[in-house]
Amino acid sequence: MAKKRVFITGITGMVGSHLADYLITHTDWEIYGLLRWRSPLDNIARHLPRINEGGRIHLVYGDLRDSDSINEAMRVAKPDYVFHLAAQSYPKTSFTAPLDTYETNIQGTSRVLEALRQYAPKAVIHICASSEVFGRVAKEKLPIAEDCGFHPASPYAISKVGTDLVGRFYAEAYGMTVMTTRMFTHTGPRRGDVFAESSFAKQIAMIEAGQVAPVIKVGNLQSLRTFADVRDAVRAYYMLVTVKPQPGAYYNIGGQYSCTIGEMLTHLISLSPKKNAIAVEIDPERLRPIDADLQVPDTRKFEAHTGWKPEIGFEKTMQDLLDYWREKIAAGQQFLTR
C-alpha cells in the first residue's frame, strides 16, 4: 500500500516545522512542504539530510500570491492530508501592509483550495484561521465559544475572518473535507520575535549576553491571553485530520493557562539570573491602534470530538522559549531588538 502524502504550507515556520517533527516521529507519511525561495531553513535544518538524500521530506517552492506555483505544487504532491498554515501572520505588520495581508491570507487560501479541488479533491484539509477573528470580546462572553460573533481588531484578524469563511465555503459548496481551526495563543521554541512573549524572551537573552542594556521594551501589558504550547498545537492538528474528520467543522483550540501579557513577562524575567537588574519600558511603537485584549477559549467542542487535551504546562513552554533564544545567541547569532 502506498504511503499517505501530506502537504504543509509554511513548513519552515514555527508551527509548520514542529508539525513536520511530529509527523516524522508518529507517522510514515511522505511530507511535502511549501516554501518561498527566500524562506529561511533554520527551523527545518535538522531535517535537511532527509531532504537532500531523497528521504521523506520534499520541499516545493511556491507563493500564496501566485496561482501557477500553487497549482504546480498540488499537482506534484497530490496530498491525502493538507495543513494550510502559511500566512502573513503578524498583526502589527498588517496595520502597515493591510492589502498584502488580505492578498496573502484570503486570496492565498482560495488559491490553495482551488488547486486542491483540481488535483486532490478527496484530501482531508485543515485551514488555519485564528482566535483573532473574535477580536474585541465582552467579558461576559468568556470563555469564547465557536458561535461567538466576529469583531476583528486588525487587518490580520479581518484576513483570518476571510480565511475562515473561505474554508467553510469550499466544504459546503464543493463537498470537500475542509475543517477550520481558531487556534488561540500558542508559542514555544522557534516563535518569531515579532510576537510579544518571544520578543521578551529574546530581549532577556540578549541582556544576559551583555548585548543590550537591561531594559525590556514592551507594548500593551494588560491584554489577557490563554497560552498553549506549539507542540500541543501540532498534536491537535494531527488529531483534527485523523480522528473522524467532519467536513465543514470549525473548532477553537487553545491552552488552559490564562494570564495577562504583563504577568507572562514577570514570569519570564523571574527565570533570568539578571532579574533584579531588568527594567521594563513602554514602547509606543509596540502598541496597536486597537487590540484583541480578552482571548480565553472554550475548547470543549474540539476536546469532545478528538479527546485532545494540552499536556505541556505554561512554565515549561516559557522556559523552552527562553532557552531557545539563549542557544541562538550563544551560537554567535547577532540580532536587532524587535
Image (cartoon, rainbow, N blue to C red):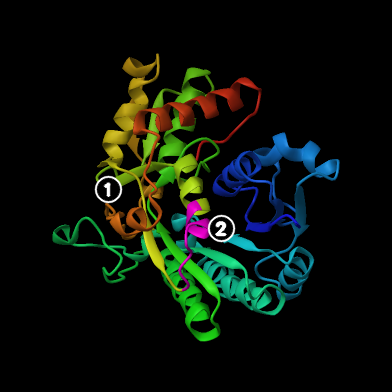
Say what amino acid the circle numbered 2 marks: Leu
**Residue at point 31%, 54% (across, down):** 299
Q: Which mark is residue 53?
A: none
In the depicted view, which residue is nearer to us: 262 or 313? 313
Residue found at the far front of this picture: 1
> Can residue 212 be seen in the rendering of this structure?
no
Instruction: Report which residue position mark 1 lands on.
Output: 223
**Residue at point 35%, 33% (across, down):** 314
Which region shows up in magenta? 239-247
- Which of the two labelled residues, at mark 2 and mark 1, occupies the earlier sequence position? 2
* Label 1 environment density (alpha carbons within 10 Å; few <14, some 14–19, many ≥20): some
Q: In which quarter of the image is residue 160?
A: bottom left
**Residue at point 37%, 20% (across, down):** 271
In the rendered view, would you say 277 is above or below 39?
above
**Residue at point 43%, 61% (across, down):** 181
Instruction: Report which residue position mark 2 lands on.
Output: 85
Report, in whole angstroms, how far the alpha carbon at label 2 lies from the one at label 1.
25 Å
